[in-house]
Image (cartoon, grey):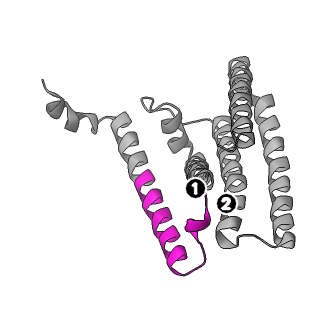
Amino acid sequence: MTVASKFPKFFATPKGRVVAGLSLAGGVVGFSAGMLIGKLEKGGALSLETLGWSDILSGLIALMLIATGLMVLLASFSRKASGRLLDPLSQRDATRGQASYYRQQGVVALLAGLMLSAPVLLLAAEDPPPFELAAAVMTGILALFLLQTLVNLTLWFRSDELVRRVISETGAVTFWILQGALFLWAAGEKLSL
């Protein structure tokens, strides 16, 4: 049996339908975001030419976080969809608690994307931005950060020991990676590289 003969059978399975549905949703979100950015740039509302590579990368990551957060958030309102996303091979619906937990995770991703995109969008709209506008955006980011921290703490207390351990270890690894990256970046900046 070849891969080509197995391919149609894959999409007949529940896992295959989930993969196809998520791929279609990702394509629609990506195409829509690209169209929106293109129209805003043609209309003069955004100028991507003034942005550096780090701003463009931050914007891309922010778009992915926002899209993921929205998809998870929307799926969490259906217990059936939440159950399929949690375990594609199971026919069991998610419980109310699982759907609520999933919804909170979507909110965290959405808030992270909004916070990451705000400075990039401000610089794309006005470079350099007026002080009052920059201060207002920073105040909004601070408010979203506090809200995200509250939701993260709620998720922490609702989690079991395995999830808490994964969060702790992921946080530690992330800390060391970012510390190293920031050190190397600062050294490169000092050396004008």
Q: Is residue 35 above or below residue 181?
A: below
Which stretch appears magenta?
26-52
Is 139 placed left or right of 117 in the picture? right
Majority secondary structure in the magenta region: helix
First in residue order: circle 1 vs circle 2: 1
Q: Is residue 9 above or below residue 117?
A: above
Is 109 placed left or right of 2 in the picture? right
Q: Are marks 1 and 2 in contact (CB under 8 Å)?
A: yes
Which residue is painted at 45% across and 29% down in the image? 90
Residue type pointed to by label 2: Val
Checking the image for residue 56, the label placed there is 1
Count neighbours of disc 2 (C-alpha within 10 A) and say few if under 14, some if 14 to 19, many if 20 or more: many
Q: Nearer the viewer, residue 176 or 98?
A: 176
Which residue is painted at 70% across and 20% down in the image? 169
Res 17 quadrant in image: top left
Residue type pointed to by label 1: Ile
Residue 36 sits inside the magenta stretch: yes
Q: Is residue 59 above or below residue 152?
A: below
Q: How many marks?
A: 2
**Mark 2, residue position:** 120
Res 101 quadrant in image: top right
Residue 121 pos. (x, y %)? 66, 65
Which residue is painted at 75% across and 41% down in the image? 190
Residue 191 pos. (x, y %)? 71, 39
Q: Secondary structure at mark 2?
A: helix
Residue 98 pos. (x, y %)? 64, 35
The N terminus lies in quadrant = top left
Residue 35 sits inside the magenta stretch: yes
Count neighbours of disc 1 (C-alpha within 10 A) and say few if under 14, some if 14 to 19, many if 20 or more: some
